[in-house]
């Protein structure tokens, strides 16, 4: 093979892979747009629901905010869901279950995916600027060049890896995903922290207002998101 042929092959490899990753990026960006549009529809529907079911108390908040091009914030009740799209494209590790599916074995490039992470935070963490509070990854969406997707997540958000390649990320998927994420968040309650975690507090912390006190608050302090959804953390499945 000549030097020119080697160079041509190199450039072909570069452009082919770059084109594939650009397609993944476009699909992921479009998916975030579908999520945003559906959240907007839900907000409008909730306004009508609140007017129809008026009470003496103030209505429970249900509102959204677009933060830049790659982040959507949905606030409802005392919770916030953040949908964060990563701008890069990722491939799964060789040991990942996805890599063992016939779908990926037939075309390795199908394993390259964009990611939209879904985090749950307490609304008060933002309201009172409690910078030490922590959020919780409740799910993440993987979307490939063919717009096929699957979701890793907790309980309602968990899909099986072998569904990858069977469904595209379209309106039906968005509806199911948002319903599952909101339902899981509503049922994912704030637990009293262990006594030993909060028994000591510094003078500096006490001199600060409760708005900025640095005692960390989270729904599950010390727990980690388990991608395989096995109940190894003590978090109720």
Image (cartoon, rainbow, N blue to C red):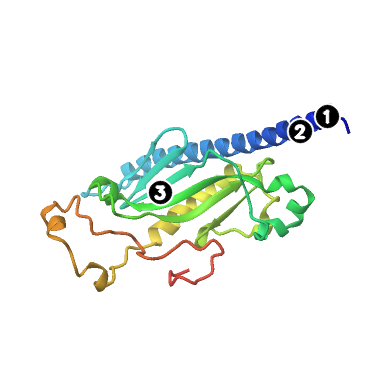
Q: Is residue 137 left or right of residue 112?
A: left
* Residue linked to disc 1: 3
- Residue for point 27% across, 59% down: 216
Structural distance between the alpha carbons of marks 3 and 1:
53 Å
Structural distance between the alpha carbons of marks 3 and 2:
43 Å
Q: As displayed, is residue 86 above or below residue 177?
A: above
**Quick one: SS at disc 3?**
strand
- Residue for point 57% across, 53% down: 151
* Residue linked to disc 2: 10
- Residue for point 45% across, 55% down: 137
Residue 128, horizontal then vertical, whole percent: 22, 48
- Answer few, some or many: residues within 10 Å of disc 2's Cα (few below 14, many 20 plus, some between 14 and 19): few
Question: Foreground mark, 3 or 1?
Answer: 1
Residue 234, horizontal then vertical, whole percent: 43, 72
Mark positioned earlier in the residue sequence (3 or 2): 2
**Quick one: SS at disc 1?**
helix
Q: Residue furthest right?
A: 1
- Residue for point 47% across, 61% down: 225
Question: Foreground mark, 2 or 1?
Answer: 1
User: Is residue 76 in view from this perspective?
Assistant: yes
**Quick one: SS at disc 2?**
helix
Mark positioned earlier in the residue sequence (2 or 1): 1
- Could you say which quadrant of the image residue 186 lies in? bottom left
Taking depth in this image into account, of 72 and 225 the one nearest to the observer is: 225
Point out the image quarter for the N terminus.
top right
* Residue linked to disc 3: 81
Taking depth in this image into account, of 192 and 46 the one nearest to the observer is: 192
């Amino acid at each position: 093979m000549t030097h020119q042929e080697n160079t041509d092959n190199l450039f072909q490899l570069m452009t082919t892979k770059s084109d594939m990753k650009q397609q993944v990026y476009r699909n992921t960006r479009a998916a975030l747009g579908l999520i945003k549009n559906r959240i907007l529809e839900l907000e409008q529907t909730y306004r009508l629901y609140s007017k129809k079911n008026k009470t003496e108390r103030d209505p429970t908040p249900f509102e959204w905010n677009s933060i830049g091009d790659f982040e959507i914030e949905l606030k409802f009740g005392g919770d916030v869901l953040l949908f964060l799209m990563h701008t890069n494209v990722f491939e799964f590790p060789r040991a990942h279950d996805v890599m063992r599916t016939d779908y990926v074995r037939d075309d390795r490039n199908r394993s390259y995916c964009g990611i939209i992470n879904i985090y749950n935070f307490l609304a008060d963490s933002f309201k009172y600027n409690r910078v030490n509070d922590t959020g919780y990854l409740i799910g993440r969406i993987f979307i490939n060049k063919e717009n096929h997707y699957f979701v890793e997540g907790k309980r309602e958000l968990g899909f099986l890896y072998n569904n990858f390649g069977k469904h595209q990320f379209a309106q039906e998927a968005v509806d199911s995903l948002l319903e599952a994420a909101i339902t899981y968040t509503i049922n994912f309650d704030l637990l009293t922290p262990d006594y030993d975690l909060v028994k000591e507090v510094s003078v500096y912390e006490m001199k600060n207002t409760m708005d900025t006190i640095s005692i960390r608050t989270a729904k599950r302090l010390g727990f980690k998101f388990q991608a395989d959804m096995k109940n190894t953390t003590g978090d109720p499945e």
